[in-house]
Image: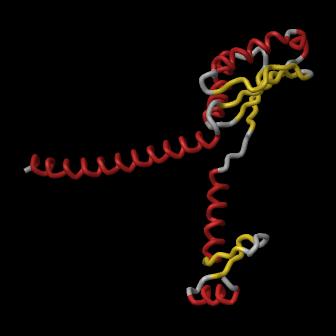
Amino acid sequence: MPLAKALELAQEYDLDLVEVAANARPPVCKLMDYGKFKYESAMKAREARKNQAHTVIKEMKLRPKIDPHDYDTKKGHVVRFLKQGDKVKITIMFRGREQSRPELGFRLLQRLASDVEELGFIESNPKQDGRNMIMVLGPHKKKTEAMAEAREAQAARKAGRQGGAAEESAGSTAEAPAEASSEA
């Protein structure tokens, strides 16, 4: 179709004539509302950015001679991080004579890995780095899946709170007439 006729057609339908493939012979053009097209592509890009997950590495520091309660607390933090879909870097810090017993740190890291194996896996095995021993745990589920589960759980909690409030208000109105009749 000649360019003049295409422009006339675009003006008639109040659309824009957009060149799709300039290198083709003959060049390929399309009739479209270009403003709407730009808006929709910007919305798609924004949605993609919203659902994009940033890889975050959380760090947990331990000592080889850790108290059982402290270990449970730190393990709880590691579990929370893995449930959120984050990687966890566990560092065991050795001081003084502890440096001559790296097997204590290795056993502690293996114990922690076995305690959280249903949520994560060992991404990098324990290795000695000067005074520290480091291990990285990765989650089994991706960050986007964890974010979606968290949103669903939050929506369920919100619906539960709204449903509970409706039941309470319905229950209080039903009790009021019964009290009035017993007084009479």
- Residue at the image position 71 percent from the left and 45 percent from the top: 54
- Residue at the image position 69 percent from the left and 89 percent from the top: 4
Relative height, residue 133 to residue 33 (above, below): above
Residue 166 point in image, percent of width and height: 31, 51
Relative height, residue 2 to residue 79 (above, below): below
Residue placed most toward the observer, 27 or 38: 27
Which picture quadrant has residue 41?
Answer: bottom right
Relative height, residue 100 to residue 125 (above, below): above
Residue placed most toward the observer, 173 or 160: 160
Total marks placed: 0
Horizontal relation, residue 177 to residue 110: left or right: left
Residue 51 point in image, percent of width and height: 63, 51
Residue 150 point in image, percent of width and height: 54, 42
Horizontal relation, residue 132 to residue 29: left or right: right
Which picture quadrant has residue 124?
Answer: top right
Horizontal relation, residue 15 to residue 101: left or right: left
Residue 82 point in image, percent of width and height: 64, 32
Locate the N terminus and report the quarter of the image it occupies: bottom right
- The colour mode here is secondary structure
Residue placed most toward the observer, 102 or 14: 14
Which picture quadrant has residue 72?
Answer: top right
- Residue at the image position 74 percent from the left and 75 percent from the top: 26
